Amino acid sequence: MRVTVAVGRKVMPLDQVRDQRVVSALQAAARDVGTRLAKAKCPTHGRGPTDVRLHFDASGNGDLKYESCCEKLGEAVSKLV
């Protein structure tokens, strides 16, 4: 899963953030999302989400994006996250 963070006006990968308190908190959130997404499977195709991206804005709000095979997978994901 790719995790990015907005710091001021700049967007950077989580591994470039220097404040370890922020990094730890966002890593924990990403692990939680990853654990939940691992359970998501499309009832029609049996696939899970791919190309998962999690972005945190400057306020700490998360935005999850991913590729899915169909709407049924999106419904499964929304029930878990």
Image (cartoon, helix red, strand yellow):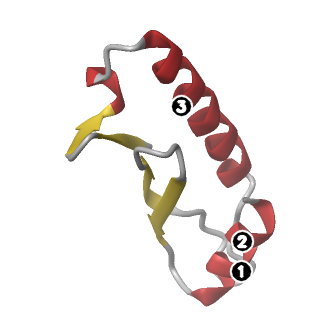
Picture coordinates of residue 63, whole percent (x, y): 49, 59
The residue labelled by disc 2 is 78
Point out which mark residue 26 bears: 3
Q: What amino acid type is highlighted by mark number 2?
A: Ser
Q: Nearer the viewer, mark 3 or mark 2?
A: 3
Quote the CA–CA distance across marks 1 and 2: 5 Å
The N terminus sits in image quarter: top left
Residue 41: name its quadrant: bottom right
> In the rendering, which numbered label is found on residue 47?
none
Q: Is residue 57 above or below residue 46?
A: above
Q: CA distance from mark 1 to mark 3?
A: 25 Å
The amino acid type of the residue labelled 1 equals Glu
Q: Secondary structure at mark 1?
A: helix
Q: Residues within 10 Å of mark 2 (few under 14, many from 20)?
A: few
Amino acid beneath label 3: Leu
The residue carrying pointer 1 sits among few (fewer than 14), some (14 to 19) or many (20 or more) residues within 10 Å by Cα, namely some
- Residue highlighted by disc 1: 75
Q: Residue furthest bottom?
A: 71
Q: Secondary structure at mark 3?
A: helix
Q: Depth check: 25 or 41 in front?
A: 25
Mark 3 vs mark 2, CA separation in Å? 20 Å
Q: Quadrant of the C terminus?
A: bottom right
Q: Are marks 1 and 2 in contact (CB under 8 Å)?
A: yes
Measured as percent of width and height from the top left, residue 16 is found at 26, 22
- Residue under the point 32% across and 22% down: 17
